[in-house]
Image: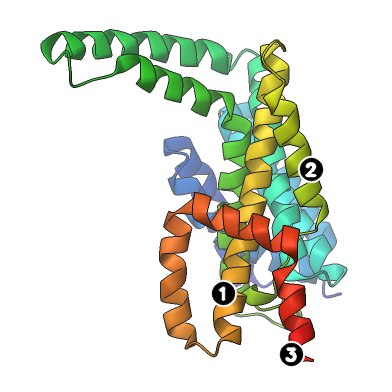
Amino acid sequence: MNNKIPTGTLTLTLLAVVAYIMLTEITLIFGPVVMPFAIYLLLKIRQQSNVNYWILFFSFLIPAVLFLSPLAAGSFIILYIITSLLAHTLDKNMSQELTLFYTTFAIGLSTMATVVVMQMLGFLRPLSEIYSTFRNWYAEQLNAVSELTPAGVDGETILQSMDLYFQNLPAFLIIGSFFLALYIILIVRILPQDSRKMWHYRSFDRWMMPRMLLYLYLLIFIIMLFSGSWEESTITLYSNVSLLLEWGLFIHGLAFAYYFMLQKKLNKVLAVIILIPLILFRPVTVLIGLFEMIFRIRLIMELRRK
């Protein structure tokens, strides 16, 4: 392994990491935009010198903890967690699909851990208090609007929807982490590489979720039918798990729809265009994935081809 890091690579890495930290401080949206480029450069340093990779980590971490906000320090730690995970998957020659799911949960869980630590240290109010304050304010605005247009606004339904979204916030965080992980992996993959071999992958039409996901989804569905007298925390847990399983079925259904169209000799461009409404109408695609898992339609089609 070459221990000498080119000056240009080191300079670009420092700039990318600083930009990521600063943009994350400004807004949580801008930070993830430059995150893949910082990860790409850190991976190059990790490939050339593991020692320098960790020296760079502590060189940034100590000033971030002492002089910057907890958000900046936490975002930098998350950056290194994801980079180290991606480096490990490359070393182990893992598939791109497996890497995608590992990265998804690494981003989601590390973000949740950062929020919990910031709450424990007093840098962040409990999310329940923040939401309660916002909900009360928003309820007042809805009441004011409903007095002007009594038949136009159903404030109670809107508040119930907000409560449901807040209840499922961990699941939505994992789902958002999936799209961020997909963005990171795709950007790292298309940027110029030295001698490193990238993740091997299957075409999207060959993606298949494990059948165990179907059993878990049906089990959670049955449990939720008898959850009327349960504690709210238990219901919230099952609701979040159910939502994640639904998204797994959604990806499975989307992949099967693409596979079905390709098997019917449909043009790839047209097949991708048809996938767009299936992405927008998620419940329909979830049902497609559910029926495919139950009746094993893909397996039947493969057997008929033989």
Looking at marks 3 and 2 on the same chain, the residue that comes earlier in the sequence is marked by 2
The residue beneath circle 3 is 305
Where is residue 269 drawn, in percent x and y? 44, 83
Relative to 251, say whether 257 is above or below.
below
Looking at marks 1 and 3 on the same chain, the residue that comes earlier in the sequence is marked by 1
Residue occupying the point 17% across, 13% down? 150
Q: Give the residue type at disc 2.
A: Leu
Relative to 115, say whether 200 is above or below.
below
Looking at marks 1 and 2 on the same chain, the residue that comes earlier in the sequence is marked by 2
Q: Give the residue type at disc 3.
A: Arg
Quarter containing the C terminus: bottom right
Q: Secondary structure at mark 2?
A: helix
User: Is residue 110 in view from this perspective?
Assistant: no
Where is residue 143 drawn, in percent x and y? 24, 8
State the image quarter where residue 228 is shown.
Answer: top right
Where is residue 122 drawn, in percent x and y? 62, 12
Q: Residues within 10 Å of mark 3 (few under 14, many from 20)?
A: few
Give me the C-alpha separation between circle 3 and circle 2. 31 Å
The residue beneath circle 1 is 258
Q: Give the residue type at disc 1.
A: Tyr
Residue occupying the point 48% across, 36% down? 25
Q: Secondary structure at mark 1?
A: helix
The residue beneath circle 2 is 216
